[in-house]
Image: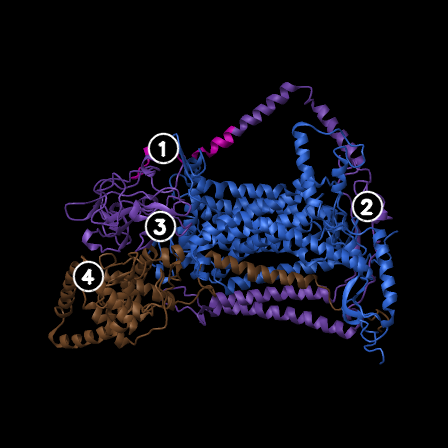
Amino acid sequence: MRFLNRSVGRLSRHRRRPLAGLVLLLLGLLLTGGLYSAFAPATASTASDNEELVAEGRELFLVGCAFCHGQNGEGVSTVNGNWLGPTLAGVGAAAVDFQVGTGRMPMAQPGAQNPTKPISYDQGEIDALAAYVASLAPGPAVPDPSDYSLAGLSSDEREEAIARGGQIFLTNCTACHNYAGKGGAMPRGGYAPNLSDTSAKHIYEALLTGPGQMDSFSNGNLSPEEKRDVIAYLYSLREQPAYGGFTFGSLGPVGEGLLAWVIGVGALVAIATWIAAHTARSNKKKGAAA
Amino acid sequence: MSDQHGSDPHGSSDDLPEKYAGHEGEMQAADEPIRNPGLPEHTWRPTDVDPKAERRAERQVAGIFGLAAVCAVLFVVSYFVFSIGGSPEAQVSQIGNLGASNVALGGTLGLALLLIGVGLIQWARKLMSDHEMVEMRHPARSSDEDREVTLKALNDGLEESGIARRPLVRNSLLGAVTVLLAPAVVLLRDLGPTPNQVAEDADYPGAGLEKTVWEKGMRVVRDVVGTPIRPGDMEIGDLFNAEPELVFAVDEEGEPILEGESLLIAKSKAAVVLIRMDPDENKPAPGRENWAIDGILCYSKICTHVGCPISLNERKTHHLLCPCHQSTFDLADAAKVVFGPAARPLPQLPLAVDSEGYLVAQSDFREPVGPSFWERDSQASTTE
Amino acid sequence: MSIDTSKVATSNSSAALADKPNRVGAAANWADERLGLASLAKKNLRKVFPDHWSFMLGEIALWSFVVLLLSGVFLTLWYDPTMAEVHYEGSYAQLRGIEMSGAYASALHLSFDVRGGLLMRQMHHWAAMLFIASMMIHLLRVFFTGAHRKPREMNWVIGCLLLILGTLEGFTGYSLPDDLLSGTGIRAADGFMKASPVIGSYMSFFLFGGEFPGTHIIPRLYVVHILLIPGLLLALITAHMLLLVYHKHTQWAGPGRTEQNVVGFPMLPVYAAKAGGFFFIVFGVCALMGGLFTINGVWLYGPYDPSKVTAGSQPDWYMGWPDGALRIMPGIETHIFGHTISWNVMLPILVLPIVMFLVLMVLPFIEAWITGDKRDHHILQRPRNAPTRTAFMVALMTMYGLFWAAGGNDIIAIKLHLSINQITYFMRVAVFVGPVIAFIITKRWCISLQRKDQEDLLHGYETGIIMRSPEGGYSERHLPLSPDRAYVLAAQDRDPDVIAELEAGPSGPDGNGVEPKTGIAGKLEGVRQRLRLAMYADNVQKPTREELEAAHHHAEHEHELQAGAEGHAADGHQFDGHHSVEDDRLRADD
């Protein structure tokens, strides 16, 4: 609680500044926008459910997220002007579902790279948090399973979708995530994560929202069908056997070279040692033994 | 020449160590602290003296060869048993999550070969005689007599040819052979056109090192699908891998305009990345103030280092990293190099919006894209 | 003193060959009457090869080359070196309907529609990696043991050429599948060529038959890969082997082994069986690796497209070190008189490898120039007995290793959670500092080992037995080395006495040398003298006979003092591995 109080104190100091009025105005606008987005598209029957979810989410948010992201998700900046936690207005439910659902949020410590961790919330709580953040300002919603499923396509269409997804993957994704989706290095200690175990929903959300340093691939960039195809391609890679044997992480020629030296050269030198080694000797003499 | 140090290292082999020990004649045999004790007495292996052990080794080796044969048979079986697909419908056989055919074929073939090798070596180690033998070395150099004879033969031959006495014949021959190198070199001329010939005569658009297929009004389209882009399609933080419209364009009969070679050449120079950032974050280079549309910037995707396509972008810092050699460019600062071996910024494509609201190029790149080359002179546009 | 050769067998069996005219005999007669095989085979059938594991490293390279030829021929039956566009309609579903070059389509066909084709592709690739790796460890073995010295310098040069050609052969092969990785490699090679001053872009346009990528590069690389370089490799390997046979193999110092003989097993049958067996083993290891470990899964990379790229785009390991140099090179470029000079590409990828290979090739000649040694050498040196040479190669290895690591900086960064930027900055310094440190450490290490050898020779080996004298003093018991072991330690060459040379001045140690040289020759001579000093001055020399005798005399005196313990329990030497324990009593009072 002390931490929370302290952050409140910091906020109130902000409020006394000349800019405070502007911030407040913006906040108000954002809030109005958020409320609008929360209510406007919702049908009458789900409106009250959603309201409850938002309220629950706000409770969770205040406890778990507000320290960095501010009491109302407006973000908290540090003394030197960086974000401690960025503003969440407009990031949408998809971003929350991705960040919290993969364990990236809540963060253990601020830094350039936000690694995955064991998940801190159950899916119900994540939904509530997502609903609350979505209520702040309009943003991408959590995708529906039908968005990334090939169900309903004929087998030819599926094959075509997977092949197209492969080409899109190789054009847009492999530069960072590697040809097999195994991840790669980024500047200054950052990295593009391995996609081998990422769920379809989370891949979709990552494309929509651009988590961390990743570019976003909004629907204007990759259409929903194209996103679906990329996911289908990645899943097809998971399902296919390792045709050539063990892959050792599919990291490319570096791993292969290491293997050639350690296993190939290692085994052959060991065998050479055996070939040239002296065999057991007897202290008997030939002839004398008979 | 090599024997100016007196002691002949290749003398009679009766008392080798003493004679040989001389180093440039200054070291005496007395310096050798320990005399060569000579070959140790031969000791026998169990298989030499114990008939039982010998028979056991024999059975062991034969058994190894037998196993190798079994593996070879299993190879043939695996070849026919495991499916590698072979048609779109056929199921690929698997062992665990590995492709069964490859693992089984490699495993059986490898074991068969390995066992034959192990058997042979075991045979040599256990059963073949292991008496060490001694062979005397001979100096690599020819004997003095041989040298003399050879020299004489050579001199006789040269003398009879008259090569020394007839400089005219000799020199004209040397000259002719030298000139003969010219046809050999000239023959390679048609390996390819020169860069200038390509730039002037090639029958595809955007030919040459200095140009690409981009031109005024050409739309920027999404890679792979080829659809044009409105500024409104892009959100801040989006990165589009894009191509010039011509890459996907078709003629009246629906045939692609660029195909095969010309398509690959076009893509190898004209590929771009489109990125949208907060317009306030962008620091355009002087003279490029109107090259961006609402924070949408377009840069060549071809690294100025050695030409890898480059699209590893950090959304927050706008740093674009090359996966080949880690050159890093700051897209918010005219794509200047911030790290790595590249020396020049990525060329920027000036953008505009056409009458239908799609992104188009104002012109081709104002400088050659891709790696540096000798004839390139782009200092003016790169040293801000 | 003469070597006792009476214990040496000239024949291992007494059974003479049957002399009856059988079918084999008839065939042999037929062949010999036409080819004169008998006089050719007379010497070589029983040619003696010394036996040591380190002598078989080159053999790994030889046999993996044979595997490469065999698997390569198989691949050519399906591989189609064309860049003509095709629609893929083969078995690999994820790429069906995609436009690709005929070369890539045939690589996919080999992998997914030819049974055993993927195995052969992978065996070929693994064997290529082993080929170059084993050439390199063979080279290291040769250099560390001094086998490159006279008369084998030319064979060293041939070996270096084999290494260069093998590397080029590997690179051309890497480029053939025309997948995204190999295409990226060719694209980078295009950038390297364009960085050459004056002729760069012409080289590129001639090689590619126009602009990159064109349609000519794959067929041209194919011809180079399957005809030109393999032909050269075969010719050079033949020359390498013929010289090996002519010089006869080097051997380690040991009882009965001299500079004038070679002791070992005969070609027929022992060496033929061992070498032949090793061929099958190398073949088998390649097959097992090809069967169990994926290498270059081209289907995942997709066809080459100049606008696509993948993270972890690296060359195969043997090209990794110049690639590493390229990665850590700062971006320096000069624009002058309308021309561009790309130091950032030219220095690391064009100049550095050529310089490194030239240095490697002339090493035996530089060493011979410094040492002034004109003798033939057939007895190998232990690495410790040439500390400067050993340290120099370790320094080169360190530099190579650091460049190599820099070539994998992105993989190191993700696997060890480091920053590529920091790795790069570190490497920029380390490639210069690391070799120096490695040189100093290795040299001192070698000299310490030499000291230990000298200790053992003079005072015997340490038994680990602590003796207590009647006065209460403690000492460790030393026992003399076995005569064979002592001989091995004492068989090294004595280095020239450079200090004496220096003191004697330019006229030479014996005072009747040639006129001191002047001008450039004189300067060079000065350099040579300084290098000689650096090479030899700190080395430990083996003891002279007098020193050894004095030390042994001293040891006998010690033994007398310790004689009280002789024959008593735990007098120490039974269990130290230097003696047979068969006839020793375990306890004095048993």
Mark 1 or mark 3, which is nearer the start of the sequence?
1
Mark 2 or mark 3, which is nearer the start of the sequence?
2
The answer to whether residue C583 is above or below residue B322 is below
Q: Which residue is mark 3?
A: B310
Three-letter code, disc 2: Tyr
Instruction: Report x, y in % for residue B317.
Output: 31, 53
**Which chain is indicated by disc 2?**
B
Instruction: Report x, y in % for residue A249.
Output: 45, 63
Q: Please state the total of marks drawn on the protein image.
A: 4
Q: Can you tell which of label 1 and label 4 is closer to the viewer?
A: 4
Q: Which residue is mark 4?
A: A16
Instruction: Report x, y in % for residue B140.
Output: 75, 42
Q: Residues within 10 Å of mark 1 (few under 14, many from 20)?
A: few
Q: Can you tell which of label 2 and label 4 is closer to the viewer?
A: 4
Mark 2 or mark 1, which is nearer the start of the sequence?
2
Q: Residue B20, labelled with which disc?
A: 2
Q: Residues within 10 Å of mark 2 (few under 14, many from 20)?
A: many
The answer to whether residue C235 is above or below residue B93 is above
State yes or no: residue B183 in magenta. Answer: yes
Q: Which residue is mark 1?
A: B197
**Drawn colour of chain A?**
brown
**Drawn colour of chain C?**
blue
Residue A218 visible within the image:
yes
Q: Which segment is the magenta one? A: B182-206
